[in-house]
Amino acid sequence: MCKTFSFTVTHAPGDELAVYDCNEVTPEGVVIGDQSHSTIAERHGLRESYTCEPAKCEIHPVGVLCGPDVDISTWEFVLDEERAPRWWTPENADKAERLCRERLARLDMEHLTSVGWNLFLSGSQVTSLGALTSVGGNLDLRDTRITSLGALTSVGRNLFLERTQVTSLGALKSVGGSLDLSGTQVTSLGSLTSVGRSLFLSGTQVTSIKGVTVGGSVYGFQGVE
């Protein structure tokens, strides 16, 4: 699965490297678009050929995701390919990383508070969502060291928290899709008022779901409704 933040770098003989993504900086603010490499290729008309080998790259957040304490210089750059393109020399790899980091810097993570699309952070070294208040699509935090959702108030689609160290839902009020808390140390649903689809509570110590509207099924709940 493509993870946040995804980029595609191209190189043709005699040409400079070029980097593409689906993120935008508009007068209204930053738009974090689809992070799928196939969507990036389709949007920008990128076609792999003998003379043009696109390289799928990603920058994975480390530490704080956004807000005044973010430091994107520490984030991890990776080549998401089983085999590197023929042009991927040490020199070009350094150039590709620099270009991708420049593209990421345009998003002004210090002031970012909302993401309109999916945010896939599973397996990353992110430890805090910082100033993030809303995610319009899916939010995947599985296998991260996140302990609290902080200022986050809403997730438009599914929220995956299993295999995390989350103990608090913070300011979270609504999840448009399913919420999976399986195996977490969460003991209370806090300010949560609605879950659009299913609620997974297996292995948790949540004892009450009073005041929470659930549009689908509730799994693994051992307390009192």
Image (tube, rainbow, N blue to C red):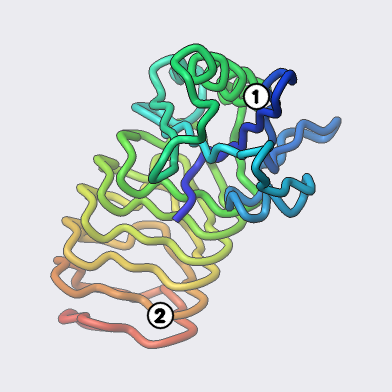
Give the distance between the C-alpha atoms of the residues marked 1 and 2, in whole angstroms: 37 Å
Locate residue 94, reporting x and y percent: 49, 14
Q: Residue at x 74, y 54 (%)?
A: 42
Relative depth, front residue between 54 and 115: 54
Locate residue 179, reporting x and y percent: 39, 68
Q: Image quarter for residue 7? A: top right
Q: Residue at x 55, y 69 (%)?
A: 176
Locate residue 79, reporting x and y percent: 44, 34
Q: Give left or right: position of 201 versus 47.
A: left
Residue type at mark 2 is Ser
- Dot 2 falls on a residue whose secondary structure is loop
The numbered mark at residue 1 is: none
- Dot 1 falls on a residue whose secondary structure is helix
Circle 2 packing at 10 Å, graded few (<14), some (14-19), many (20+), is: some
Q: Residue at x 31, y 58 (%)?
A: 161
Q: Is residue 198 above or below residue 33?
A: below
Residue type at mark 1 is Arg
Q: Is residue 41 above or below residue 210?
A: above
Please state the total of marks drawn on the protein image: 2
Farthest-out residue, right = 27
Relative depth, front residue between 2 and 25: 2
Residue designated by label 2 = 198
Circle nearer the N terminus (1, 2): 1
Q: Residue at x 29, y 41 (%)?
A: 146
Asked if disc 1 and disc 2 are in contact, CB closer than 8 Å, the reply is no
Q: Is residue 225 above or below residue 182?
A: below
Q: Give left or right: position of 78 versus 38.
A: left
The numbered mark at residue 103 is: 1
Q: Quadrant of the C terminus?
A: bottom left
Q: Image quarter for residue 62? A: top left
Farthest-out residue, front = 50
Q: Give left or right: position of 158 versus 149.
A: right
